[in-house]
């Protein structure tokens, strides 16, 4: 399972062009069992149908939902990690990757995070690392 952020991953900064989507599609092609859960803040102002419409038709079925909002306990850090973990727990997910540009939303050293650069978004280098990580998680 891939928890997907948009800004700084699917496009650079906040330009909203989804210019890096072909790389994400390439990842999905190379990792056929991978499904996506939207963890981006976009989920707070758009429904899942709209979020799916941002993807080309062949990839829309890969999106199985979006994370909910979670309130952290006093002293707890990593709200995005907590949202992803809540989804993981409630859906009994065994293996997952969080693809995000903002490490401040995760506890320091969070093992499930693959961080992209906010100013470049997803790159070929990220793609290679994610592909390797996926196949490692799948035991291949």
Image (cartoon, helix red, strand yellow):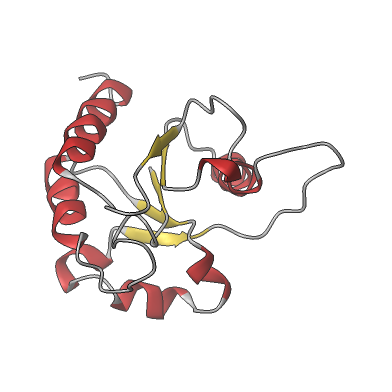
Location of residue 89 with respect to 50 vertically, above or below: above
Location of residue 44 with respect to 139 vertically, above or below: below
Is 30 on the left or on the right of 100, as rendered? left
Say which quadrant the C terminus sits in.
Answer: top left
Say which quadrant the N terminus sits in.
Answer: top left
Residue occupying image coordinates x 59% and y 40%: 85
Location of residue 62 with respect to 113 vertically, above or below: below
Please provide percent x and percent y for residue 42: 49, 70
Residue occupying image coordinates x 26% and y 67%: 60
Please provide percent x and percent y for residue 98: 43, 41
Is 89 on the left or on the right of 4, as rendered? right
Is 100 on the left or on the right of 131, as rendered? right
Residue occupying image coordinates x 16% and y 55%: 25
Residue placed farthest to the right in the image? 74
Give the mark count. Answer: 0
Residue 96 at least partly seen: no
Location of residue 15 with respect to 67 vertically, above or below: below
Please provide percent x and percent y for residue 56: 18, 71
Residue occupying image coordinates x 21% and y 63%: 59
Q: Nearer the viewer, residue 17 or 81?
A: 17
Q: Quadrant of residue 6?
A: bottom left
Residue 51 at least partly seen: yes
């Amino acid at each position: 399972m891939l928890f997907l952020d948009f800004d700084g991953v699917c496009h650079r900064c906040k330009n909203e062009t989804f210019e890096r989507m072909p790389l994400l599609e390439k990842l999905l092609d190379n990792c056929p069992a991978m499904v996506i859960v939207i963890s981006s803040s976009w989920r707070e102002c758009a429904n899942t149908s709209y979020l799916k419409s941002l993807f080309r038709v062949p990839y829309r079925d890969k999106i199985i939902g979006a994370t909910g909002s979670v309130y952290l306990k006093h002293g707890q850090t990593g709200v995005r990690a907590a949202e992803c973990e809540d989804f993981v727990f409630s859906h009994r997910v065994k293996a997952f990757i969080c693809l995000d540009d903002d490490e401040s939303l995760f506890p320091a050293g969070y093992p499930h995070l693959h961080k992209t650069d906010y100013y470049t978004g997803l790159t070929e280098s990220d793609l290679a690392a994610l592909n390797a990580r996926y196949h490692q998680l799948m035991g291949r």
